Amino acid sequence: MMSAPSSPAHPARLVIATRESPLALYQANHVAGLLRGLYPACDVQLLGMTTRGDQILDRSLAAIGGKGLFIKELEQAIEAGQADLAVHSLKDVPMDMPEGFALAAILPREDPHDALVSGRYDSLAALPAGAVVGTSSLRREAALRAGFPHLKIEPLRGNVGTRLRKLDEGTYDAIILAAAGLKRLGLAARIRAILPAEQSLPAVGQGALAIEIHASRTELHGWLQPLHDADTTACTRAERAFSRGLSGSCHTPLAAHAVIEDGQVWLRGFLAAPDGTRILRGDARGAREDPEAIGARLADDFKSRGAIAILAALPA
């Protein structure tokens, strides 16, 4: 059970900046509930905001600047003193934090895998030639094109509800979503199949929630430590180091997923050309005390096996 830190100075009021999508609000309310449990006298409030990433839905994230567009306005609210912290899906957080900001806590991870959602088909293998599959991810698209070249991959944007509605209206035969988001929203029944990591390696940080604060707020960092999960942090630090080593961005069909196995971090990585014609896979193991070294080592291994050429061919 989580317990409050020993510091006598407990927070009197905390404001959480959050996007206003149903999933973001769920995640922010989840953290708010944990904080209220830790600090019953604290007034915990939410500051809902609409980000540029939420406003532009007719183009891919890669085309408009990447997932960092989901968090910039939240950081501005923290900088201006309107909010104390922001709750993010860790997979939306750029690999290099902006100067002056820090991730104060990473919470225990939900299911990190991708999920197949379809009204008719129970697996990717069951989809017939020409079936339309919707995804917003270059990573998923590359994996699908490599493993199921007979499928037609189409872009899919919007919040979870919007994506499910487009599926139900018949725009797609199936869509791929993060299992974590569906489960958090009480929509686990919509999942037809969990895609194994061997078929669709998860995105860096997928399933994990991160709390961002201004780096100068050392007292806030201390208050948030009871929410921090050491295993999830070690795994996601390795994943993010791998991505950082390959200059991963929304333009990069890249995946990484780590677990704790036999006391070590086991990290698997994936890098592909967008059309799935060139794919690199690999893994590395190492001490959980230095997860960044594991990620950097795996990135170097990928570079030695052709990653540089794949990265050079990607759009700028």
Image (cartoon, rainbow, N blue to C red):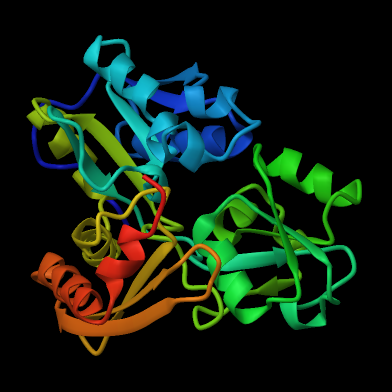
Residue 147 appears left or right of 266: right
The quadrant in which residue 96 appears is: top left
- Quarter of the image for the C terminus: give it: top left
- Is residue 153 positioned above or below 78 on the image? below
State how many labels appear: 0
- The residue sitting at 20% across, 84% down in the picture is 285
Residue 110 appears left or right of 140: left
Residue 152 placement (x, y as % from top left): 75, 64
Residue 251 appears left or right of 170: left
The quadrant in which residue 38 appears is: top left
Residue closer to the observer: 227 or 172: 172
Work out which residue is located at the far bottom of the displayed protein and give it.
262
Residue 155 placement (x, y as % from top left): 67, 48
Residue closer to the observer: 282 or 37: 282
- The residue sitting at 27% across, 21% down in the picture is 84
- The residue sitting at 19% across, 80% down in the picture is 304
The quadrant in which residue 142 appears is: bottom right
- Is residue 166 positioned above or below 294 on the image? above
Tell me if residue 13 can be seen.
no
Residue closer to the observer: 216 or 56: 56
Residue 1 placement (x, y as % from top left): 32, 57
Residue 228 placement (x, y as % from top left): 25, 52
Tell me if residue 241 can be seen.
yes
